[in-house]
Image: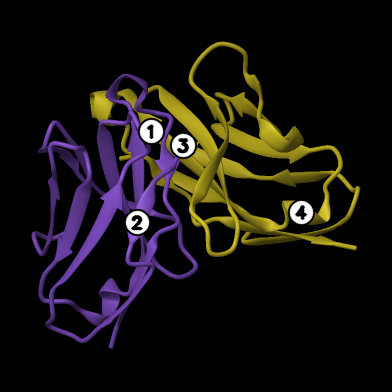
Chain colours: A purple, B yellow
């Protein structure tokens, strides 16, 4: 049983560019959450998707957007990249009924130069 | 708003010694509490969680934590650590205001290093 898979594992972009990160949830899970983990800090909640809709959002600007597909996979898009967007981006999946048990992927390391 | 404070950024300890990683939280409503572990180049793995009931929670790999409402703490303990426990540990909190979304607020982490 595959867990949460994220792609790519590493990514290098320059300021002003746009990036798309992808996540496939654990089999049977219907909810996907995205977190940003800056170096030396704990993860920060970006947003959560369920039934192809954004259900809750953390304190992140509109440059951060997402999407969930009918197969429950999800994308995180970041526009107009800033140096401060450099971080590890973690995807977590869960079942909406057992939402407190999150399974995390290994993340995508984004470097903005 | 809720917040989590992990009082120690780094904890070195010798193998087979006991360890306690401290976590304090602030919230104006009832909370749910979690400890996650992150090994190098990996995602986070749930160690244990407190939702309700007994304040002493046992998790995987021999870890346990005690919820203390009066002191707003949720310290993680292990009676005897192994080299393989070397990792970053994160305390996290969510509350019922987020409904079914269970948005987690994480602390800044504690790096546990087990020395031979």
Q: Secondary structure at mark 1?
A: strand
Report the disc number at residue B94. 1
Instruction: Tell me which chain the residue with mark 3 is part of.
Output: A
Q: Position of residue A38 (x, y in %)?
A: 39, 67
**Farthest residue, direction front:** A1
Marks 2 and 4 share the same chain: no
Report the disc number at residue A2. none
Marks 2 and 3 share the same chain: yes
Instruction: Tell me which chain the residue with mark 4 is part of.
Output: B
Above or below — where is B86 with respect to B102?
below
- Observer-nearest residue: A6 or A17? A6
* Residue B96 in view: yes
| Marks 1/3: CA–CA distance | 28 Å
Task: Tell us which disc is closer to us: 4 or 3.
Answer: 3
User: Residue, x 40% and y 59% (percent of image)?
Assistant: A107
Q: What is the count of numbered marks?
A: 4
Marks 2 and 1 share the same chain: no
Cβ–Cβ under 8 Å for marks 2 and 1:
no
Residue carrying label 2: A6
Residue carrying label 4: B84
User: Residue, x 26% and y 24% (percent of image)?
Assistant: B100
Q: Secondary structure at mark 4?
A: helix
Q: Is residue A52 left or right of residue B71?
A: left
| Marks 2/1: CA–CA distance | 24 Å
Task: Tell us which disc is closer to us: 2 or 3.
Answer: 3
| Marks 4/1: CA–CA distance | 28 Å
């Amino acid at each position: 049983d595959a867990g949460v898979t994220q792609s790519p594992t590493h990514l290098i972009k320059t300021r002003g560019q746009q990036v798309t990160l992808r996540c496939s949830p654990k089999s049977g899970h219907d909810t996907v959450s995205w977190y940003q983990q800056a170096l030396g800090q704990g993860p920060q909640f970006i947003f959560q998707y369920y039934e192809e809709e954004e259900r809750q959002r953390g304190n992140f600007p509109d440059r951060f957007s997402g999407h969930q597909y009918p197969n429950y996979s999800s994308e995180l898009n970041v526009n107009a990249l800033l140096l401060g967007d450099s971080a590890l981006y973690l995807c977590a999946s869960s079942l909406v009924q057992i939402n407190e048990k999150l399974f995390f992927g290994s993340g995508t390391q984004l470097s903005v130069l | 708003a809720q917040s989590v404070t992990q009082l120690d950024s780094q904890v070195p300890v010798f193998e087979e010694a006991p360890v306690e990683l401290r976590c304090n939280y602030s919230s104006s409503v009832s909370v749910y509490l979690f400890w996650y572990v992150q090994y190098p180049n990996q995602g986070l793995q749930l160690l244990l969680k407190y939702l309700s009931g007994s304040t002493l929670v046992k998790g995987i790999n021999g870890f346990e934590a005690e919820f203390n409402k009066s002191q707003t703490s949720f310290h993680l303990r292990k009676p005897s650590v192994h080299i393989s426990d070397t990792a970053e540990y994160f305390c996290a909190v969510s509350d019922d205001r987020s409904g079914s979304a269970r948005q987690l607020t994480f602390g800044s982490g504690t790096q546990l290093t087990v020395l031979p």
